[in-house]
Image (spheres, grey):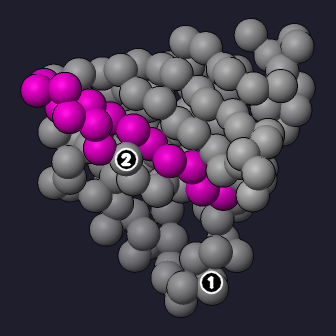
Amino acid sequence: MWTDKTHSRTRIENDEVAWLTTVSSQGVPSTALVWFLLENDESILVYSRDPSIRLRNIGTNQRVTLALNSDFRGNDSIVVLGSAGIDTSIAPADENLAYVAKYQATLDDYSWTPRWFAENYPTPIRIHITSVHGK
């Protein structure tokens, strides 16, 4: 999947925020800013508040998009399409060393601890990547 998308993969590994769009059973989209982690070449992890609109939507419609910010002219846009689901086999955020390593500086900026984040965003969502649009 990533052979001709090295720039997209690098951005997905390093960008700290993205826009997750879920769609309700009535077809109403909902977009929210999220922190995320590329777990491997096939999936992305997001932790969510519970309850949330995104969890309700994913419960009835697993199709999602994850869009990275573009530049101010709309260049360098990257959109991941995938199928999302709650995955209770994933460790809490504060026990996920790769997740904590990626976000420790941001947690510090907000004066949040990894434990606080895990308590307030307890539900792991795994997005299975089906395609990536971007370079």
Quarter holding residue 125: top left
Q: Where residue 2 appears, x then y in whole percent? A: 80, 16
- Please identify the quadrant where the C terminus is shown: top right
Regarding mark 2 in the picture, which secondary structure is present there?
strand
Residue 22 lies in quadrant: top left
Position of residue 63 relative to residue 72, above or below, is above
Can you tell which mark lies on residue 10? none
Tell me: residue 86, above or below residue 1.
below
Residue 42 seen in the current view: yes
Q: Quadrant of the N terminus?
A: top right
Residue at x 61% of width, y 14% of height: 131
Q: Position of residue 46 (x, y in %)?
A: 46, 45
Question: In the rendered image, is residue 57 in sight?
Answer: no
Is 117 magenta? The answer is no
102 vs 28, left or right, is right
Q: Write down the region rendered in magenta.
A: 16-30
Q: Amino acid at mark 1?
A: Asp
Say which quarter of the image contains residue 103.
bottom right
* Vertical arrangement, residue 71 with respect to residue 25, above or below: below
Name of the residue lying farthest toward the bottom: 111
Q: Amino acid at mark 2?
A: Thr
Percent across and percent down for residue 37 are: 61, 44
**Residue annotated with mark 1:** 108
